[in-house]
Amino acid sequence: MKLKGANVLVTGGAGFIGSWIAETLADKNNVRILDALITGKKQNIPEGVEFIKGDVRNAGDVRAAVKGVDIVFHQAANVQIPLSIEDPVFDSDVNVRGTLNVMEACRKSGVKRVVYASSSALYGNPEKIPTPETCYPDPLSPYGTSKMAGEYYTKVYSSLYGLETVSLRYFNVYGPRQNPDSPYSGVLSIFSKNIKEKRSLTVFGDGRQRRDFVNVRDVVEANILAATADGVSGEAFNIGTGIAVSINEIISMLGKIAGKNLDVMYSERRQGDARKSCADTRKAREELGFSPKIGLEEGLRELLQS
Ligand code: UD2
């Protein structure tokens, strides 16, 4: 399958990762976005892209959006783990039922392939680190559970109905346009905003928890590979770098780049927070040809300048 002249739908295309996918593909493909604009923003929608305001929780909205589409990048989701703990029903409505609505609409309208935004959160605190895809899923939050359910639905749609599906288990994605405005937003979006506004940083826990931070441009590349690779339907791939960095280490890197000591406060550890998360990247490298290109220091520098 080629990604040129294709009719593409990006659900959640006004959000962080979705808007990067839409922008990158808009050059050579016909791109449509479906977004409810709950956390997504109108200004993220790239020029020349068709926009449908609609919600994945509404089957009718999804059916209208998939008409005539060849490939779907399903990025619409609740991504906030603490919010999923506060409101697991909302999280499930968007992430499970929303995904099911997308899969049903795709099955019935002749979509060729769906690339699904899964998450490393389904591993919880895994036995093996770096974690291979074969590790037993054991989520710590409703979010990890809903992402796992969504992923398993995509797998079953591949085996039962022959709809091609590929799941990408994102590790901690960061980069420009990640929305910093909620206390539950991605840590790097919050830290870079606070540094620019000369405010202190808050660390939840001792700061020794580790994350595998992967740049959004590399995640776009992974999506394109997942949309075009042969022989991968029904499979799930870790999308990370294979390097885990602690929150304390991130703060010293940011301090170095900003050229000053940062004001840091420590607060209580978050519920449902994994201790260490790091991708085993072999399967994605071998089967998709994925290899992340943007180093963390380069990515952090860009974040502070954006
Ligand atoms: C991120 C994604 C989640 C999922 C997961 C996969 C977001 C918002 N969350 O969850 O959707 O894909 O990765 O692994 O994109 N922290 C602080 N101070 C802050 C904010 C966070 O110390 O101001 C800590 C937090 O407690 C955690 C770490 O930083 O230990 C990362 O937090 P996060 O919310 O960026 O991401 P995570 O791993 O919970």
Image: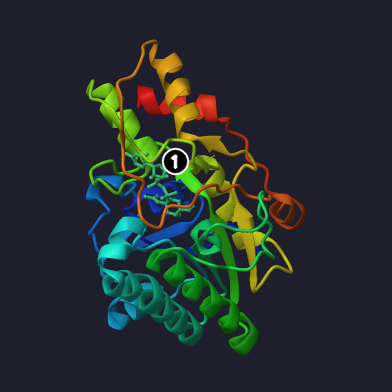
Residue kind at label 1, given as amino acid type = Tyr
Residue labelled 1 has its Cβ within 8 Å of some atom of ligand 1: yes
Q: In percent of the image, x 33 and y 59: which residue is there?
A: 50
Quadrant holding the C terminus: top left
Quadrant holding the N terminus: bottom right
Coloration of the structure image = rainbow
Residue 179 placed where, x, y %?
A: 30, 44
As displayed, is residue 251 above or below residue 69? Answer: above
As displayed, is residue 126 above or below residue 192? Answer: below
Depth check: give the residue in front, 25 or 40: 40
Residue 286 placed where, x, y %?
A: 77, 53
Residue 260 makes an appearance in the image: yes
- How many numbered marks, from 0 up? 1
Residue count near mark 1 (Cα–Cα under 10 Å), binned few <14, some 14–19, many ≥20: many
Which image quarter: residue 244? top right
Depth check: give the residue in front, 190 or 60: 190
Answer left or right for 93 relative to 244: left
Residue 56 makes an appearance in the image: no
As displayed, is residue 127 above or below residue 206? Answer: below
Q: In percent of the image, x 37 and y 24: which residue is there?
A: 304
Residue 70 placed where, x, y %?
A: 52, 70
Which image quarter: residue 52? bottom left
Residue 275 placed where, x, y %?
A: 51, 48
* Residue that badge 1 annotates: 174
Regarding mark 1 in the picture, which secondary structure is present there? strand
